[in-house]
Amino acid sequence: MLGIGFPELVVIFIVALIVLGPERMPQVARQLARWVNEFRKAADELKKELAADEIEKSKDEINKVRQELLNKVYHPLPETDPAKTNPEEKQAQKEKTQEKSNQKVSQETKAS
């Protein structure tokens, strides 16, 4: 409680009693109690809102990571099943790779 002990509270009470008088002291104490309760409610409400915001941010981050993982795991791979490719396609692929390698070799010889 803000580092105020019992002896300090007694001193504050005595000073308030002298300044306010015994007639106004109960009214001021009630008003002070209302302010303290309102302040506590506002502080608790603020804590709940901040916690809800943090939870929402965490949920968003978790969903992003989840989506990235799902994309990596379920990303369709190109079809490379040899049983599904016909011999003509195999020959065409071989020719393409030969052409690419020939182009690379010719580029290397031109460069040197």
Image (tube, rainbow, N blue to C red):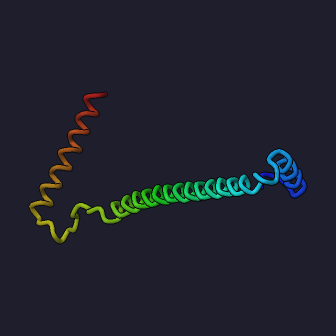
Position in image of residue 33 (x %, y %): 69, 57
Horizontally, residue 49 falls left or right of residue 105, namely right
Instruction: Compare residues 46 and 26 and report the one nearer the observer.
Output: 26
Image quadrant where residue 71 sits: bottom left
Residue reaching furthest to the left: 88
Horizontally, residue 29 falls left or right of residue 47, namely right
Position in image of residue 50 (x %, y %): 53, 54
Kindly identify the residue that appears in the image at 16 percent across and 49 percent down: 96
Instruction: Compare residues 75 and 64 and report the one nearer the observer.
Output: 64
Kindly identify the residue that appears in the image at 40 percent across and 61 percent down: 63
Position in image of residue 39 (x %, y %): 63, 53
Position in image of residue 90 (x %, y %): 15, 60
Horizontally, residue 81 falls left or right of residue 18, namely left
Kindly identify the residue that appears in the image at 54 percent across and 59 percent down: 48
Quadrant of the drawing holding the N terminus? bottom right
Kindly identify the residue that appears in the image at 31 percent across and 28 percent down: 112
